Image: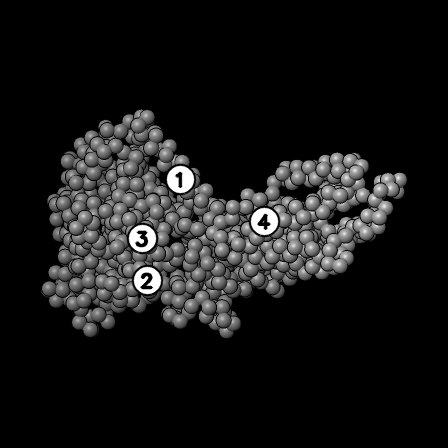
């Protein structure tokens, strides 16, 4: 079964409206699906996921289980049912996006549908499961949606730090059996899958529009850690290294392993081997990895970083189009035996400048599964 | 669920409904903060061929072709358009269930704004080899224009049986997989029944379209208002004889039919394409012209000419509907005939419902008032539509009038008939068959009055 995410008006714009007075019902200008009506065009298909992902371990499952249980206990029966899914509901588990909920509805329940106490209980899951950096980043990304909404740019209706963010729980929280907490909305997807000591925090999507902004005198830069490390890495390449790192198979205006691409098929490795970099450059690769991996609670993040660092010699970096933080379609990639990170400067119709989209996947542990396949 | 929670939900729901309604009405207001940068492929699966439409965002095409100068205007320049058609055709393929390759034909090429983003719209025809049985039930559609180089691009493929109303999503083509199985969209009926059913559908669509499209009927009726009269010294005066009035009606209806049939055929066959906004604006102008003509003769005896001339414009609007049917080339002529027949039938029914009342009323002293009132209403509606369609007004307060329900139409016709009968029954309102000038002199001689 496949669910297609389209903006809500697509069904009407594709139908032949014979009662139109204009005599031109739904011509090409009226828009077909996809091109018209807002063809967001993200589809989510049930995929075959197991719970044998290769995890470096270190999960704080014992701490997470009670806070998830506590959150569920704040809900009435209807809402608890809305939040809870079978662990093997893989179509729902793979439903996340870089689009706002108005375009791609999320699973679970929206924060705006919860009381303040219930919201606190939901967010307590994140502060327990994630590091301070990770939980702060989520808050900042949500703040970006309030800010974007306040700008009132084209299509920025219906955003917001509450209305656009949802939480869902897959399976029963347990220290021995697998379960997933899914939290996300526009520009954020946290898929946290626990299985005893094993943990997966991928696919992880982070993004922000605008890239920097100020609210009530406080400056925000939700992807500061990720963008700073990555742009520094590519900015520091020698001319030869830069040439060697260029991805030549095609060009990019967004992610290729973004939402809906869950069949486990990654692009052919391209670019420059990290082993070709000097020690300080390699440290920038580690810093970049840490910016993503470090979102998780410390012990698990440390274990995963040890794994990725050990795999550094088999890891490559690549870029396409541009490498500057404000350049059009700057596209940066880290590709290892396990880790996959893409970062892109992409455009929207809401603000005049580029904004950031980024995805972190683990080829052997996405959704806590060893065999993501279509 | 607690009551404190259900109230905000109801409010949210209500707000959503209003939002959806606004989207439906305005057609604007995309919900996405991101560029709608996907390609849309719309396939109409027929009995013998698959036709379709490709909507490619021009800015993404420019990236994929590494041609920053590829603007919407440049894309449809003849030489560039030919190149782009070739490019898209080279990146499109279809195979039957048995693996045989189908021919690919990419034609057309125009720019259309889809949610504010300029798209190059191309027409596609996929044809299986001659003799292949049940060719279009299951086939593989392969496509990688743009995504062959712009690897993050996505192509949303939708399909419907030819003649059906709604498209269904088939799937998404991305950098990973350029092939998509298209299954279950073949028209339900086998070919011969399909043609008959297509014809019936087209007749039905024709009826539906014109009976729902008040602007076409309003043009015709307004033009027929002065049919029982004749122009004399720049004014309308009564014309003696039901027979001549009926001839006039027949001329006008026939002239309109001839006019719109010509452009409907030309446009449906792809020889003519006029921007729908221009067509719609011209239709409003046509109603305005016929309203002015009904007040004061613009072209003495020229109703047939007006009907034929503006019929050409109305035909272009009809063509937009038939374009939307997603016709097979093979059944196009049949469906064209059916669609046109539906339009003619409806027009004849409306004329049959309204004209006797007008003819009867024209034999009463009320007719100048009826004619001028009718013309004024038409003119007001036409001005409203014109303002809306040329963009002067963002929405038309008269828009509800554009969708004329059959029930309301019948009520109007019934009211007109009642008025005609009442007016004619009142003896002192009745007038003679003689022209006005004569009637004035003989008006007092009641014995001369005869029922026509």
Circles 4, 1 touching at the beta carbon (< 8 Å): no
Q: Residue at x 30, y 63 (%)?
A: A329
Q: Same subunit under labels 1 and 3?
A: no
Q: Are marks 4 and 2 in contact (CB under 8 Å)?
A: no
Location of mark 3 (residue): A258
Q: Which residue is mark 1?
A: B16
Quadrant of the snapshot with the C terminus of chain B: top right
In the image shown, does B352 or A273 lie closer to the viewer?
Answer: B352
Separation of disc 4 and disc 2 at Cα?
A: 50 Å
The chain holding disc 3 is: A
Depth check: give the residue in front, B179 or A241: A241
Labels 4 and 1 within one chain: yes
Q: Callout 3: helix, strand or loop?
A: loop
Q: State the mark number for residue B180.
A: none
Where does label 2 land, which residue? A252
Residue at the (18%, 48%) spot, across then down: A216
- Most extreme residue toward the right, as rendered? B447
Query: Which residue is painted at 77% across and 57% down in the image?
Result: B232
Q: Which mark lies nearer to you, 1 or 3? A: 1
Give the spatial CA distance, label 3 vs label 4.
Answer: 50 Å
Instruction: Please give the chain letter of the residue carrying mark 2.
Output: A
Where residue A74 sits in the image (x, y, percent)? 23, 29
Figure quadrant of residue B265:
bottom right
The CA distance from mark 2 to mark 3 is 12 Å
| Mark earlier in primary sequence (2, 3) | 2
Same subunit, tags 2 and 3 = yes
User: Mark 1 touching mark 3, by CB under 8 A?
Assistant: no
Q: Secondary structure at mark 2?
A: loop
- Give the residue pinned by disc 4: B381
Callout 3: 10 Å neighbours few (<14), some, many (20+)? many
CA distance for labels 1 and 3: 28 Å
């Amino acid at each position: 079964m496949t669910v297609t995410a389209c903006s809500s008006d697509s069904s009407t714009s594709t139908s032949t409206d014979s009662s139109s007075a204009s005599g031109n019902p739904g011509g090409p200008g009226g828009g077909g699906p996809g091109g018209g009506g807002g063809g967001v065009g993200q589809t989510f298909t049930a995929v075959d996921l197991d719970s044998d992902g290769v995890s470096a371990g270190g999960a704080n499952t014992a701490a997470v289980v009670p806070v998830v249980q506590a959150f569920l206990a704040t809900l009435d029966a209807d809402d608890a049912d809305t939040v809870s899914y079978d662990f093997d509901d893989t179509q729902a588990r793979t439903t996340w996006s870089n689009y706002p909920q108005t375009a791609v509805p999320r699973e679970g329940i929206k924060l705006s549908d919860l009381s303040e106490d219930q919201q606190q209980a939901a967010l307590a899951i994140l502060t327990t499961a994630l590091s301070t950096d990770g939980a702060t980043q989520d808050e900042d990304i949500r703040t970006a949606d309030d800010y974007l909404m306040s700008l009132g740019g084209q299509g920025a209706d219906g955003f917001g730090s509450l209305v656009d963010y949802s939480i869902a729980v897959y399976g029963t929280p347990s220290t021995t059996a697998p379960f997933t907490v899914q939290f996300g909305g526009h520009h954020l997807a946290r898929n946290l899958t626990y299985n005893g000591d094993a943990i997966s925090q991928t696919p992880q999507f982070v993004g922000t529009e605008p890239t920097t902004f100020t609210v009530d005198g406080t400056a925000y830069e939700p992807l500061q850690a990720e963008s700073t490390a990555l742009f520094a890495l590519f900015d520091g390449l020698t001319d030869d290294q830069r040439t060697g790192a260029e991805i030549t198979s095609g060009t990019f205006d967004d992610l290729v392993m973004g939402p809906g691409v869950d069949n486990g098929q990654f692009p052919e490795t391209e670019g420059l081997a990290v082993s070709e970099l000097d020690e300080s450059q390699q440290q920038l690769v580690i810093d970049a990895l840490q910016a993503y991996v470090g979102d998780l609670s410390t012990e698990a993040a440390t274990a995963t970083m040890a794994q990725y660092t050990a795999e550094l010699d088999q890891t490559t970096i690549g870029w396409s189009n541009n490498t500057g933080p404000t350049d059009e379609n700057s596209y940066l990639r880290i590709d290892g035996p396990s880790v996959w990170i893409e970062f892109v400067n992409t455009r929207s119709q809401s603000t005049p400048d580029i904004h950031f989209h980024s995805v972190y996947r683990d080829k052997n542990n996405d959704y806590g599964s060893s065999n993501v396949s279509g | 669920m607690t009551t404190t929670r259900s109230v905000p939900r109801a409010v949210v729901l209500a707000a959503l409904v209003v939002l959806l309604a606004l989207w439906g009405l305005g057609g604007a207001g995309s919900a996405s903060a991101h560029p709608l940068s996907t390609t849309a492929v719309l396939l109409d699966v027929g009995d013998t061929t698959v036709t379709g439409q490709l909507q490619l965002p021009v800015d993404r095409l420019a990236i994929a072709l590494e041609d920053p100068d590829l603007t919407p205007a440049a894309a449809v320049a003849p030489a560039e358009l030919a190149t782009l058609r070739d490019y898209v055709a080279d990146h499109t393929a279809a195979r039957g269930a048995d693996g045989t390759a189908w021919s690919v034909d990419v034609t057309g090429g125009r720019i259309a704004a889809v949610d504010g983003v300029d798209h190059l719209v191309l027409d596609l025809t996929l044809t299986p080899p001659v003799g292949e049985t049940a060719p279009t039930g299951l086939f593989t559609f392969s496509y990688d224009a743009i995504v062959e180089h712009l690897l993050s691009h996505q192509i949303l493929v939708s399909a419907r049986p030819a003649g059906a109303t709604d498209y269904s999503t088939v799937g998404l083509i991305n950098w990973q997989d350029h092939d998509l199985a298209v299954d279950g969209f073949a028209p339900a009926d086998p070919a011969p029944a399909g043609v008959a059913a297509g014809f019936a559908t087209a007749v039905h669509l024709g009826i539906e379209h014109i009976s729902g499209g008040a602007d076409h009927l309003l043009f015709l009726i307004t033009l027929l208002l002065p049919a029982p009269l004749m122009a004399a010294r720049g004014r309308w005066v009564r014309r003696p004889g039901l027979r001549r009035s009926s001839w006039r009606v027949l001329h006008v209806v026939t002239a309109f039919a001839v006019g719109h049939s010509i452009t409907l055929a030309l446009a449906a066959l792809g020889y003519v394409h006029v921007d729908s906004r221009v067509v719609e604006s011209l239709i409003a102008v046509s109603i305005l012209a016929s309203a002015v003509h009904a007040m004061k003769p613009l072209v003495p005896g020229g109703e047939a000419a007006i009907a034929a001339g503006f019929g050409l414009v109305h035909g272009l609007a009809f063509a937009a509907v038939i374009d939307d049917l997603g016709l097979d080339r093979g059944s196009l002529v049949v469906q064209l005939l059916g669609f046109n027949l539906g339009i003619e039938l409806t027009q004849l029914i409306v004329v049959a419902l309204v004209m006797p009342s007008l003819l009867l009323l024209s034999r009463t002293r009320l007719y100048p008032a009826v004619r001028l009132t009718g013309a004024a209403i038409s003119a007001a509606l036409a001005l409203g539509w014109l303002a809306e369609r040329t963009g002067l007004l963002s929405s038309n307060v008269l828009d509800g009038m554009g969708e004329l329900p059959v029930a309301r139409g019948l009520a109007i016709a019934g009211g007109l008939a009642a008025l005609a009968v009442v007016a004619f029954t009142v003896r002192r309102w009745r007038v003679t068959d003689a022209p006005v000038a004569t009637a004035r002199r003989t008006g007092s001689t009641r014995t001369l009055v005869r029922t026509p």
